[in-house]
Amino acid sequence: MLTRLKLTAIRDQLDTLLDQAARADMTLREALQLLCAAEVAHQNERRIQMGMSIAKFPCVSTLEGFEFEAQPSIDPKQVRGLSTSRWVANGDTVLLLGPPGVGKTHLAVALGREAILRGYSTLFASATSIVTQLVWAHAEGRLEEKLTQLGKPKLLVIDELSYLPLEANAAHLFFQLVSRRYERGATLLTSNRSVAQWGGVFGDAVVATAILDRLLHHSHVITIRGDSYRLKARRKSGLVRDTTALAAAT
């Protein structure tokens, strides 16, 4: 009967759980609560594992593993506030802006993982991958299908937007995606350029303005200023000289 009801955690741990209840001299109600708690914990673990798999994160990054002291321009309270995922529930936008190597992708993955822990479906993809999917779908007459697919996750994480300029057609397709998700699903974007420079990224100031109008309406912006973690590591190892000291020497 437990198999038929798909209560596999209770089924697999039944003897152990009943022994535990007997040793604790539990009432029937307390024993039932123990059994249900075991099942809920098991199903929640499976949900999280499946959510992490579907999200397609490129790495395992957590907020606990982020070195806030290495990036003093970031307000830890703001990031921890975002970790509650209220912004995901509200369908807001988070923009992580800053030069390469300062931890934008780390934070994006960490916030995406927090969203999954709180029960929100999440998908991670690079901006290049998203645009390529849209262009191919448009060429094959399946754009509506692709927009519907990308509109389903409660949180869509788009990494590395603006590293490469978009062609006009691609920019218009990206605008359709942003419009589809506007006030319906949350979006997190990382970019190495300030929003003031996005006109050049999309190749059309009008399209860029329309995209930003939707993204910034309900948004949380984190601008990271500082050196790349990789450059810091190389400086420590002596492979790269400190740019400030080099400029002073010249």
Image (cartoon, rainbow, N blue to C red):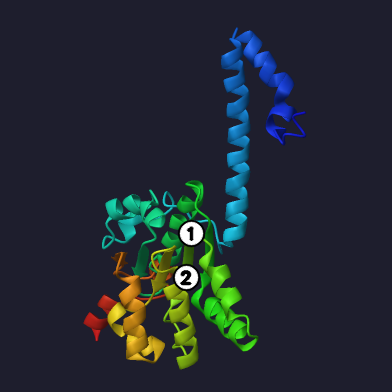
Residue 101: x, y in percent?
A: 41, 70
For residue 135, say whether it is visible.
Answer: yes
Q: Residue furthest left?
A: 248
- Left or right of 114: which side holds 90? left
For badge 2, the amino acid type reads Ile
Q: Please say if 184 is above or below 203.
A: above
Residue 223: x, y in percent?
A: 29, 68
Q: Crowdedness of circle 2 by 10 Å Cα count: few (<14), some, many (20+)?
A: many
Query: Which residue is painted at 60% across and 7% down in the image?
Result: 25
Q: Which residue is mark 2?
A: 158
For badge 1, the amino acid type reads Lys
- Left or right of 168: which side holds 59? right
- Left or right of 27: which side holds 169? left
Query: Which residue is painted at 56% across and 15% down in the image?
Result: 30
The one nearer the camera, 107 or 155, is 155
> Label for residue 154?
1
Query: Which residue is painted at 40% across and 52% down in the image?
Result: 85
Q: Crowdedness of circle 1 by 10 Å Cα count: few (<14), some, many (20+)?
A: many
- Please state which of the two labelled residues, at mark 1 or mark 2, is closer to the viewer: 1
